[in-house]
Amino acid sequence: MNAGRETKPDIYESLGEQLRLEESLRITTGDYRKAVLALLDLAFADSGGSRFAAQVLLSLYDGDRWQVDLAGVCCGLDGGCFRNVLIAMRGRAMLMEEPHTVVANGDRLFEQLADRWKFLAKPASESHS
C-alpha cells in the first residue's frame, strides 16, 4: 500500500545524499578563476593541448557556437590541465558564471580567443538551431 511513498528514513537518506553531492561539487570563484586563467594560458600557447583548452573555454563561453572534442580533451591533456578543465566546468555549473566574467579583461580575452580559433566554430547554420 505504500508503493511510491518514501518513509522518513528514506527521505533523510535522500537529503543526505543530496548534501554530499553538493559538497563534492562546491567550488570557489577563486578556484574557478585560476582554472580559467591556466586554460587561457594554454589556449593562447602553441602546444598540443592548446586546441582542447580553447574548445573547453569557448564552449563554456558560448555552447551554441563552440563544441568540445571530449575524447581529445580526455586523451590530449596532461593531468594538471585536465583537472583545470573539470574545475572550470564545475565553476560554470555551480556558480552559474560564464568564464569570461571571472577574469580581468575577460570580454577582450575571449574575443581574441574566439578569433584565434575561429576555424573550430560550428558553421552558422548549425549554431542556434
Image (cartoon, grey):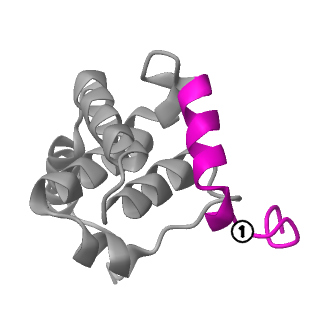
**Quadrant of image for the N terminus:** bottom left
Report the residue at 33% width, 32% height from top: 37
Report the residue at 32% width, 27% height from top: 33
Q: Nearer the viewer, residue 25 or 98?
A: 98
Q: Is residue 97 visible?
A: no
Report the residue at 54% width, 50% height from top: 58
Q: Which of 76 and 128 is in front in this view?
A: 76
Q: Can residue 81 be seen in this view?
A: yes
Is residue 115 highlighted in magenta? yes
Q: Give percent across and percent down for residue 57.
A: 46, 48
Up/down of 113 relative to 21, above or below = above
The residue at the far front in this view is 46
Q: How crowded is mark 1: few (under 14 residues within 10 Å), some or many (20 or more)?
A: some
Q: Give percent across and percent down for residue 118.
A: 67, 56
Up/down of 82 relative to 27, above or below = below
Q: What element carries label 1?
A: loop
The stretch of residues the image draws in magenta is: 107-129
**Quadrant of image for the C terminus:** bottom right
The residue at the far right in this view is 125
| Kind of residue at badge 1 | Lys
Is residue 90 highlighted in magenta? no
Q: Name the residue under label 1.
A: 122
Up/down of 5 relative to 28, above or below = below
Q: Give percent across and percent down for residue 15.
A: 22, 50
* In this picture, residue 101 sits left or right of residue 123: left
Q: Give percent across and percent down for residue 108.
A: 60, 25
* In this picture, residue 3 sits left or right of residue 74: right
Report the residue at 47% width, 35% height from top: 99
Question: Which image quadrant is residue 61 in?
Answer: top right
Q: Nearer the viewer, residue 92 or 117?
A: 117
The residue at the far top in this view is 104
